Amino acid sequence: DQQVKQNSPSLSVQEGRISILNCDYTNSMFDYFLWYKKYPAEGPTFLISISSIKDKNEDGRFTVFLNKSAKHLSLHIVPSQPGDSAVYFCAASDNYGQNFVFGPGTRLSVLP
Amino acid sequence: GAGVSQSPSNKVTEKGKDVELRCDPISGHTALYWYRQRLGQGLEFLIYFQGNSAPDKSGLPSDRFSAERTGESVSTLTIQRTQQEDSAVYLCASSSGDPYNSPLHFGNGTRLTVT
């Protein structure tokens, strides 16, 4: 029973265009959400987070949107660059941001 | 170094042997996590340490798995009588433990192969 779902295993985008990665969750107790990027043979790297009191958080080319009523969040990357090609994991936590549940990941390929 | 350090980076072992994986968290981080990633799958939670509290062991898949942490420093994950299904990348992460302001910082993992 996956509490955090990323229904697209892969996504291909042209360089310079927008990449949109989606994530759905089932546990209404989740109140802190994060996105991580992972390159092969490396650990996941933190990208951006959002707490449930917000619906948008922006950091440079990365923006995370949260729709609590739909239990859905998305990561927008604009403009996409070839170096963004990686696996992206969505994560969520409850219990005051201490227990983290990860989605299965989406592999993003940015084509030059 | 300022990051989370894991050793060894790769470990090949025979089925039935015991293995010990080590994690050095970021200095000052009170929270430490172990995750496992099997080939082609997502991150699977194993165990979580927070300060001096009792660890959350709810993710450990069997009693062959155990972990210890010395104070707020190094942690070891031990797998006894390894099985082929234990083959995975074992990832350690640490955080400052501040609610809503403490993302996990991961090490590069230990790739375990059980033959």
Image (spheres, helix red, strand yellow):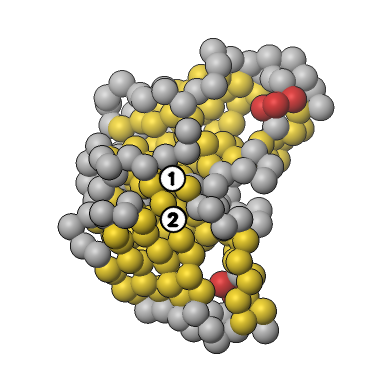
Which mark is drawn over residue A4? 1
Confirm or deny contact between disc 2 and disc 1 (CB under 8 A): yes
Q: Are marks 2 and 1 on the same chain?
A: yes
Return the chain for callout 2. Answer: A
The x, y position of residue A19, in whole percent, is 51, 74
Of labels 2 and 1, earlier in sequence is 1
Which mark is drawn over residue B74? none
Badge count:
2
Query: Does residue A61 appear anywhere in the picture?
Result: yes
- Badge 1 crowding class, 10 Å Cα cut-off, few under 14, some 14 to 19, many 20 or more, is many
The x, y position of residue B106, in whole percent, is 48, 49
Q: How far, Cα to Cα, is label 2 from label 1?
A: 7 Å
Query: Does residue A44 appear anywhere in the picture?
Result: no
Most extreme residue toward the bottom, as rendered?
Answer: A16
Most extreme residue toward the left, as rendered?
Answer: A53
Left/right placement of residue B26 relative to residue A41 reads left
Q: Nearer the viewer, residue A108 or B108?
A: A108
Q: Amino acid at mark 2?
A: Cys
The x, y position of residue A82, in whole percent, is 62, 78
The x, y position of residue A52, in whole percent, is 23, 54
Q: Amino acid at mark 1?
A: Val
Q: Nearer the viewer, residue B111 or B38?
A: B38
State which quadrant residue A16 falls in: bottom right
Return the chain for callout 1. Answer: A
Residue at the image position 31 percent from the left and 21 percent from the top:
B54
In the rendered image, the vertical position of residue A28 relative to residue B53, given as above or below: below
- Which type of secondary structure does the marked residue at label 2 adopt? strand
Residue underneath mark 2: A23
Residue at the image position 60 percent from the left and 84 percent from the top:
A15
Residue at the image position 48 percent from the left and 70 percent from the top:
A20
